[in-house]
Image: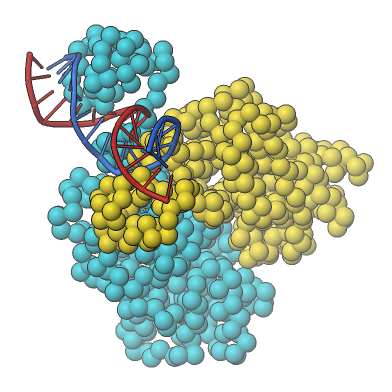
Chain colours: A cyan, B yellow, C red, D blue
Amino acid sequence: MADVGAIAGVTSRTVSNVLSGKVAVSPETQAAVLRAVDQLGYRMNTAAKHLRTGRTGSITLALPDLSVDYFSQLAGAVAREADRHGWAVTLEQTNYERQRELQVLLGQGKHLSDGLIIQPYALQDDDIEILAAKQPCVLLGDHAPGLPVDHITMANADAAQCATQHLLNIGRRRIAAVGVNSSGGPHTAETLRLRGYEAALEAAGMLTDPELLAEARRWRLQDGAAAVEGLLSRGVHFDALFCFNDSLALGALHVLSQHGVAVPDDVAVVGFDDIAVSAYSNPPLTTINPGGTGIAAAAVQALSRRLAQGPSEAAVGVVQDFHLVLRSSA
Amino acid sequence: MADVGAIAGVTSRTVSNVLSGKVAVSPETQAAVLRAVDQLGYRMNTAAKHLRTGRTGSITLALPDLSVDYFSQLAGAVAREADRHGWAVTLEQTNYERQRELQVLLGQGKHLSDGLIIQPYALQDDDIEILAAKQPCVLLGDHAPGLPVDHITMANADAAQCATQHLLNIGRRRIAAVGVNSSGGPHTAETLRLRGYEAALEAAGMLTDPELLAEARRWRLQDGAAAVEGLLSRGVHFDALFCFNDSLALGALHVLSQHGVAVPDDVAVVGFDDIAVSAYSNPPLTTINPGGTGIAAAAVQALSRRLAQGPSEAAVGVVQDFHLVLRSSA
DNA sequence: CTGAAAGCGCTTACAG
DNA sequence: CTGAAAGCGCTTACAG
């Protein structure tokens, strides 16, 4: 920077002013500096800037697993949004491990960043206190209401009820729920979606048959396949599947097809998330769309606001809209 | 660091030595320092370290689009590998844009990192010279042979020939190629895979029928669907599809099913990449597996080696193994 | 094995 | 509108 200044006939101070654009500089000086920058191929040292200002210009995105479609699509959307805000995004795969989630929240990640967008999975409500402190942070997914942390969420229970209601509307009466996880906390997606499922049944004057609750701790393709295999091998009778996410549903579709079960004639299937492949499965999957890239945009915006406001302002919670996407599977 | 030293009764120099572990420190001193670190909740300032050492501890991963399964799975694998090497990974979505690819290669990304792993898409061979310079860099995908840059690739033509050969082996004679892109350069995946396809036909004494070449500039689900719709609407007769990647194949499967075409009876389908969903499609997809997470591991390792050796050492090219995964679609 | 000191490349009160 | 100078928090020759 001093070298640039030397060529332009100014000090580093003025070069900095020109480059940051925060302080007015006379047009001639500005032109001279820019010329010198070009001539030297000068690029600012971000480390020095970071050291001085305390701002890194990057945010951390912490997700359980990038190879899960929902997360990778979320990551893509967040990257795009962050880009618009001039942020780089550093990736942190937490592998569904509480330890790593805590580590990231405590800011012990390898890389210091200005803020964090995290979708926790294994973190308990007890860990809440830790969250609020340490660093600017936006939570994705579901957590205890009243959490003093910015968060973007969706109406999980309502959406699940809507999905189940649709299955009831088309005349199904033996609807299995795929993705139940009895070890989930009270404010997790698995619990809320189960609640929505039960609410729909109840509203129709029906009881939840425990036999129809198919467990799946993780929600990957293989987990959906295994859950439905289980249902089938136990001889459970069902005419519909409400899967807690699309990967489960895709796995389910696969197993049903292998067993010669017709979808939707014998068994109707509804998913949750509307990932890209779901529109192209055989048959195409009816599913809940959780507001598209809205979550990513809301998250980045919330973090941006938090960074501008500082930690004192009250936490904001955004509830994303959803809608049922009707395709052939139900 | 000075504060920590004050408590431990040493200077920052010794604290630094303890924390870096590079210089021997007496056990008592070490214990005292560690205690002080704990007591103060001290965390090292990475910016200062970076400024001083010139190393950021992070690498940049530049991919066209995270919402494409192949790339997101690659990103997940790279993140995992980088983690093992103690690196954070910063994400750069280039959106298939030459401009952004150049920008990243020139190191003009928002974030300075120690090195770059990039899968270019729009970059031409003319840009090669730029690549070699600027920063430690590992190339993914296909490029001119003899490129003076570390690169991880696979035997695209061989794999494509293998896939096509399989279709010939099971008695198919009208094999359409899906994903042809006439504007691709001579060393791109589209060109190499087409070449493998043609080589297989030629080896069987057959000619390439231009009618069977289905264009698709991008290789997403919708592109595969559109390509096959085109084939169908043009009334082209075909009994097999060799799709240049799995997303195209999945899109194709969808359209075939919509039109009541039986797979594999009427039309056999082979894909390329073996992404996770491909094992769960209906029918499950026969495809080329490009060495699993081997590419990610090889890339991170190559970058690691490059960083240790400096720019003078000769560039290394790794050709990843592949194999055909036989499932029901062909 | 440890101290005292310089310096990495910026930004920013303090002056003028 | 611009200079001279301090300081962000580390690491590392230079000594001892």
Q: For residue A128, which quarter of the picture? A: bottom left
Q: Residue A104: name its quadrant.
A: bottom left
Question: Is B19 placed left or right of B206 in the picture?
Answer: left
From the image, which quarter does the N terminus of chain A lie in?
Answer: top left
- Residue A19 placement (x, y as % from top left): 29, 23
Give A174 or A299, whichever is nearer the viewer: A299
A83 or A95: nearer the viewer:
A95
Q: In the figure, A26 relative to B71: above or below?
A: above
From the viewer's side, name the closer residue of A91 and A110: A110
Residue A221: give x, y in percent of width and height. Answer: 56, 68
- Tell me if B112 is positioned left or right of B122 in this view: left
Instruction: Say which of B155 and B19 sits in front.
Output: B19
Asked if residue B165 is positioned above or below residue B130 in the image, the reply reads below
Q: Is residue B248 left or right of residue A88?
A: right
Quarter location, residue B277: bottom right
Does residue B183 lie above or below A132 as drawn? above
Task: Provide residue B295's location: percent of width, then percent of height.
Answer: 65, 49
Kindly identify the residue that appears in the image at 42 percent across and 60 percent down.
B27
Residue at x 40% of width, y 89% of height? A208
The x and y percentages for residue A299 are 31, 53
The reply to whether residue B276 is visible in this rendering is: yes
Residue A318 seen: no
Placement of A286 over or under A73, stated as above or below: below
Q: Count the marks: how many?
A: 0
Residue at 61%, 22% (x, y): give it.
B129
Residue at horizontal 66%, vertical 55%?
Answer: B292
